[in-house]
């Protein structure tokens, strides 16, 4: 059955003290955090269970899945964090606090009995991090050492992990361009690692030795950047004064061997393309992941050795039911990631499913979108989390 849906703008506001403004607008020194989202309500369906989507830095109401779920009879909230559409200063711990404010509002003001987190794409590791800390809060400081209060966040009753990667930090570790020799000059590069350069002596299909060398070089570049970030924060602290944070650029952050060689973690994706279009263009363009960052944001979301929001680590403590959905033609999330989360999850009730042929966004794929909706609604009904 298909339902007509009503959309409702949602405003969440709560008090938070901050040493300085990290996002433009209300959140920061004014003492209040303001977040906004959209709730989709299927008309005539009782309000008992709410499915909540949150991506750390995107607004998901325009993605096909939330509205498709609502038309299938599911109450859906697309919750925007304070960092919506700009992850430059994103602190994953604070995004989790924002998510907690939505869940509290859902139970206390809307009267939902159950809440299901749907972690799509970058929202996957956020959902698992949130659930871990809501169930048993252990994090009291961000990776930069700033205090954060994650206590009292209401846990969800189930998690859907849909076309989601292991974490933002792990993605950058597998995407950052290791050919960059000089962080201040992206034109200085190691030709042997410059996979988009026609003159690169290493071409697909890549040898296991080259793959290992490339991955090690990616990790080494990330760790050099992280060391510089920590040194910069320490320098600002030692100086004293009122300069507390600094922004910077990281060039070339989308050089994944998978985009060039379909034999690396094979799935049904098209070679030499990705969810952002031409990989080489995205590698150098302004919208690459981690392109603009603050020092604190780098440690919280991009440092593979420091970020608390690591999907694999957080999944190990998950106890609620889990549905993990892989899109077999995903052109963003690497093929092994969703299965790895499923296997790492401690939940006794966990299900793994594949939507064959589906890309990351289901763009122009109504049949695959319909299959994904059927998987979710059927799974919810089996656990008494669907419509009455």
Image: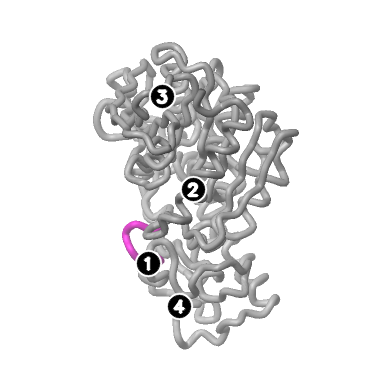
User: Upstream in the sequence, badge 1 or badge 4?
Assistant: 4
Instruction: Name the spot of residue 100 as percent of width and height, x first.
Output: 48, 23
Judge the density around disc 4: few (<14), some (14-19), many (≥20) Cα neighbours within 10 Å: some
The residue sitting at the front extreme is 1
User: In front: mark 2 or mark 3?
Assistant: 3
Q: Along the horizontal axis of the image, is 354 left or right of 146? A: right
Residue hosting label 4? 196
Q: Which residues are magenta?
A: 282-288
- The residue under label 3 is 45
Between disc 1 and disc 4, the foreground one is 1
Residue 141 percent coordinates (x, y): 55, 27
User: Residue reaching furthest left?
Assistant: 25
Q: Please state the horizontal and vertical placement of residue 54, each as a whole percent of the image.
A: 44, 36
Query: Label 2: which residue?
Result: 121
Q: CA distance from mark 2 to mark 3?
A: 28 Å
Between 220 and 24, the residue placed more toward the observer is 24
Question: Distance of mark 4 from mark 3, alpha carbons?
Answer: 52 Å
Q: Residues within 10 Å of mark 3 (few under 14, many from 20)?
A: some
Q: Residue 375: image x %, image y %?
A: 56, 44
Numbered label attached to residue 368: none
Q: CA distance from mark 2 to mark 4?
A: 25 Å
- Structural distance between the alpha carbons of marks 3 and 1: 39 Å
């Amino acid at each position: 059955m298909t339902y007509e849906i009503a959309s409702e703008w949602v405003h969440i506001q709560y008090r938070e003290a901050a040493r300085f403004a990290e996002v433009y607008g209300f959140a920061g020194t004014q003492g209040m955090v303001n977040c906004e989202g959209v709730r989709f309500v299927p008309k005539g369906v009782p309000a008992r269970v709410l499915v909540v989507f949150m991506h750390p830095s995107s607004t998901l109401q325009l993605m096909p899945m939330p509205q498709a779920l609502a038309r299938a009879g599911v109450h859906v909230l697309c919750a925007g964090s304070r960092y919506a559409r700009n992850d430059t200063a994103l602190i994953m711990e604070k995004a989790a606090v924002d998510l907690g404010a939505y869940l509290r509002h859902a139970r206390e003001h809307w009267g939902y009995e159950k809440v299901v987190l749907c972690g799509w794409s970058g929202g996957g590791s956020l959902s698992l991090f949130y659930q871990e800390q809501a169930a048993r809060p252990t994090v009291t400081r961000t990776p930069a050492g700033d205090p954060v209060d994650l206590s009292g966040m209401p846990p969800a009753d189930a998690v859907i992990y849909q076309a989601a990667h292991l974490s933002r930090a792990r993605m950058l570790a597998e995407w950052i361009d290791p050919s960059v020799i000089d962080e201040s000059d992206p034109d200085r590069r190691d030709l042997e690692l410059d996979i988009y350069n026609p003159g690169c002596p290493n071409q697909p299909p890549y040898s296991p030795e080259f793959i290992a060398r490339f991955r090690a070089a990616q990790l080494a570049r990330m760790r050099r950047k992280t060391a510089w970030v920590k040194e910069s924060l320490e320098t600002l602290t030692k100086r004293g004064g009122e300069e507390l944070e600094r922004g910077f650029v990281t060039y070339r952050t989308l050089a994944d061997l998978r985009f060039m060689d379909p034999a690396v973690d094979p799935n049904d994706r098209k070679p030499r393309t990705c969810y952002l279009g031409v990989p080489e263009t995205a590698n150098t363009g302004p919208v690459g992941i981690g392109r603009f960052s603050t020092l604190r944001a780098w440690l919280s979301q991009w440092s593979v050795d420091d970020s608390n929001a690591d999907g694999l680590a957080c999944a190990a403590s998950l106890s609620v039911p889990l549905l993990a959905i892989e899109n077999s033609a995903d052109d963003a999330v690497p093929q092994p990631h969703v299965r790895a989360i499923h296997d790492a999850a401690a939940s006794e009730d966990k299900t793994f499913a594949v939507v064959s042929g589906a890309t990351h966004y289901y763009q122009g794929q109504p049949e695959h979108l319909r299959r994904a909706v059927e998987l979710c609604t059927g799974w919810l009904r089996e656990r008494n989390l669907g419509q009455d």
